[in-house]
Image (tube, helix red, strand yellow):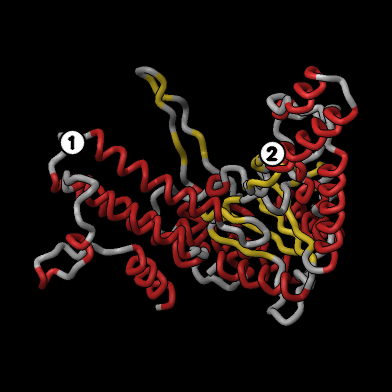
Amino acid sequence: MVVQRAHWVQQQAMRESGTLIRIDLDFKNAFNSAGHSCLWAILRGLGVPNVDFLEDLYSKSWMKITVGTGCSAPTQLDTGTVQGSVLSPLLFDLFLNALLRLLDATRITHGIKRTPQWNHDAFADDLSIYVCTVRDANKLLDVIHEFEFWSGLWISIPKSLATGAMYGTGTARRQEGAKVDAAKRKRDAGPDILNPQIQALGAMEEALDADNTAKLSIEGQEAWRINLATMYRQCPICNQKKGNCHFPTQLHLNPSCLECKHAWKPSGIKYHGTALKVIHGKTPIRLLGIRYNMWLDSTAQRRYIMDGITEVACFLRKNRDLSIENSLRLIECTLAPLLAFSGPVIIWPEKEFQRLTAAFIRCNKEAWQMSPNTSTALFTFPKDRGRLQIKMPRAIICSAAWGHLT
């Protein structure tokens, strides 16, 4: 539900041509940092009964550390919840709920029209903030810092990050600037381009070495432009393959494309005076185990799933000494959970879904120690016709989606 709610507000931001900023905060050793005195104050403020019983239970908690053959002196614990207790997750959720109520009390929201207004998403010890301006982001971060100072629940600044996207007219204007730069690169491309990856294009030099005439010089320049335009490189941010004219002229070995270079990203977001790391909006970021960017591009998550399936198939291929029963148990314990976790909340293009289905069938062929050329119908046809009828990716996704709904 946390991921789906974030998807909904991002989709609406795209429709409304809005601006959305997301800040992911990481707590330091969250479950062991909650101060006991703060926890009891929060529970009493929420009206939880029998707080005195919990306070007496925790007031006498202590630990010893074994060093070699001896033990350290007992140390009384005044922070954290009891490890392994069924009550500990609930106590931490109530503790963190106080911070979430403080964020709601600011009346600051993500600002996207025609959608419920809120400013945070939280699950266990993961907290994400959604706002529309840098000013609102800094205000919420100040509130979090005050709670941090009071409660002892510290934020890890190196592991926290900010990202964002400007949709609609702002994006169109910046993309137009990127197209103009790309056209200029394509038009003005010549031997003065300082890029190590273009050194192989020696068409112009060969023409000049053959005969230093104006005609051959023009032909060499034209050949250089054609070769430059047809070369493809992959952008490290959006992971898309584009012509070489879509990349800036510089000595950097792996620069981002012009479109990503022109794209807007937030700046000036600080936590207690320290600037947070800012990630490009087209860079996939992991949220609750699902990788996608601010444009809801889940290519990275689909690649992660395909890599996992390929790894299982290669393992089964190399370990033929495993029994068929153990191989099938391995598939049951890995492939279905891998897909069911994120499959229902990401978009699968038809071609990629076909490759996913083929990879599933290939894993089952390896588990049964059959040739890759074995008929697929043996695994997909129903059991009443003498076939295996394995659980296909479509069935796994539908089953997981129904589980989320119920």
Q: Is residue 405 above or below residue 192?
A: below
Q: Which residue is the site of mark 1?
A: 320
Residue 152 appears in the picture as rendered? no
Disc 1 element: loop
How far across and how far down the image is residue 107, in percent?
A: 79, 73
Q: What residue type is labelled 1?
A: Arg
Apparent side of residue 134 relative to residue 5 in the rendered image (left or right)? right
Residue density around tag 2, few if under 14, some if 14–19, many if 20 or more, within 10 Å: few
Disc 2 element: loop
Q: Which of marks 1 and 2 is nearer the N terminus?
A: 2
How far across and how far down the image is residue 58, in percent?
A: 49, 51
The residue depicted at 59 percent of the width and 46 percent of the height is 33
Front-most of residues 114 and 394: 394
Front-most of residues 366 and 90: 366
Apparent side of residue 139 relative to residue 237 in the rendered image (left or right)? right
Residue 103 appears in the picture as rendered? yes
Apparent side of residue 213 relative to residue 234 in the rendered image (left or right)? right
How far across and how far down the image is residue 23, in percent?
A: 71, 55
